Image (cartoon, rainbow, N blue to C red):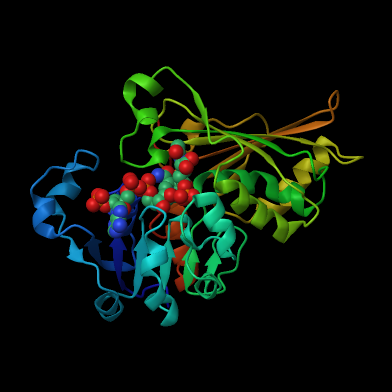
Amino acid sequence: MEEGDKMKVGLLGATGYSGAVLYSLLKQHPNITHIDLYGHHKAAEKAEFLDTAIPAYLNEHLQLKEFDAASIMGNDDALFFATPSGVTNKLARPFIENNFPVIDLSGDFRFKDSTTYSKWYNKPAAPDEQLQGACYGLAEFNQLTSHYVANPGCYATATLLALAPLVIDKLIVPDTIIVDAKSGVSGAGKKPSASSHYTFINENAWLYKLNKHQHIPEIMQQLHKWNTAIPAIQFATTLIPITRGIMATIYVKAETGVTLEKLRRSFQKQYQDKKFVRVLADGLPSIKEVVGSNYCDIGFDYNPATNTIIIVSVIDNLMKGAAGQAIQNFNHLFGFSEEAGLPSLPVFP
Ligand SMILES: NC(=O)C1=CN([C@@H]2O[C@H](COP(=O)(O)OP(=O)(O)OC[C@H]3O[C@@H](n4cnc5c(N)ncnc54)[C@H](OP(=O)(O)O)[C@@H]3O)[C@@H](O)[C@H]2O)C=CC1
Ligand SMILES: CC(=O)N[C@@H](CCC(=O)OP(=O)(O)O)C(=O)O
């Protein structure tokens, strides 16, 4: 594709949080002329109720077509899935078989083997041969080796971008990684639950899925591409009373001879040419500075008293953690400018 080429795209899941954000990004994308929205409810059923989880403009204009792989491949040039886990493993086959371009925001195609998925997601996985037809799109690092792109998870994105330089440059003791990550409530999607209920999470903090979070194997799979010596990570996820944003705070022991200057050089080498990762020259980042943008901001420090490196990474879970990175992957897949369709500034205050 050339810079000025125009495309038609399909989207399944526009009535969800990441789908709604994706829709607004696609609407402003300079290379997209038309968006077909697909749904799993019949259009008539949808029209009968007002979905308060999505913006009114979307409710009003929502014209959902019935999902049909053959007509999507006939009408559109690419497809986005913004559906919960356990959906695309049943829908992806014709797209993979026909090499049709897909960006999948769910976890269904992030692993190379089906047993890892079924163990950590507690659901049946897509067949192994289909999993081999997908590629994991950590946008700053992975070459897209197929047309079916598995967009990374939100916590996984924040954690991997923070660890990458130090893991690649072997500056850390492999078995000492501790990740303490916090997320806003939109990370859990639009479906209300006991833990996302206002009276529970307001003025509260709740650590969940300890040692069981589905992003642990996803992070390990990518870390092993960089350094096979890492045996495991300690990983905690805490829900906090904000709408958007993730902060991952990482503690890890330094290899002998590591200095703050060496850490600086490692981050700089890895990210100096990357538009969406901003390494702070000084100080530590805050969530508000990335909300509404596709940036991942990273700050770090070294404490010689404990020989510990502390890295703090922040993203907007719905942007860099989902829809924004999906657009970045789409741009990579079609050779468009990496920034096309993505806002250049966060929303502040
Ligand atoms: N929220 C986030 O921050 C992040 C989410 N993701 C991933 O993105 C995906 C979407 O997440 P999120 O936006 O939070 O989810 P939501 O629950 O907010 O939205 C889910 C969407 O999928 C649709 N849907 C549900 N079941 C089906 C089905 N069987 N067939 C077709 N469509 C279906 C829903 O339609 P309807 O409205 O009709 O029910 C809705 O449009 C998930 O896989 C999630 O893990 C990844 C990173 C971050
Ligand atoms: C706050 C919150 O609940 N966040 C979700 C992250 C959703 C996600 O990215 O999960 P997938 O792997 O299915 O894409 C969680 O912790 O499960």
User: Percent position (x, y) of residue 263?
Assistant: 78, 41
- Residue at 44% x, 58% y is 326
User: Percent position (x, y) of residue 323?
Assistant: 40, 52
* Residue 27 in view in this figure: no
Q: Quadrant of residue 102?
A: bottom left
- Residue at 72% x, 57% y is 224
234 to 32, vertically: above or below: above
Which residue is situated farthest in the right direction here? Answer: 257
Q: Quadrant of residue 345?
A: top left
Q: Is residue 111 left or right of residue 101?
A: right
- Residue at 36% x, 63% y is 80
Of 97 and 344, the residue lying toward us: 97
Image quadrant where one finds the C terminus: top left
142 to 146, vertically: above or below: above
Which residue is situated farthest in the top direction here? Answer: 203
Q: Is residue 163 left or right of residue 278?
A: right
Of 238 and 37, the residue lying toward us: 238
95 to 205, vertically: above or below: below
Of 151 and 93, the residue lying toward us: 93
User: Percent position (x, y) of residue 311?
Assistant: 68, 36
Of 303 and 211, the residue lying toward us: 211
Image quadrant where one finds the N terminus: bottom left
* Residue 261 in view in this figure: yes
Q: Is residue 141 left or right of residue 99?
A: right
- Residue at 12% x, 59% y is 43
User: Percent position (x, y) of residue 231?
Assistant: 77, 49
Number of callouts? 0
Q: Quadrant of residue 257?
A: top right
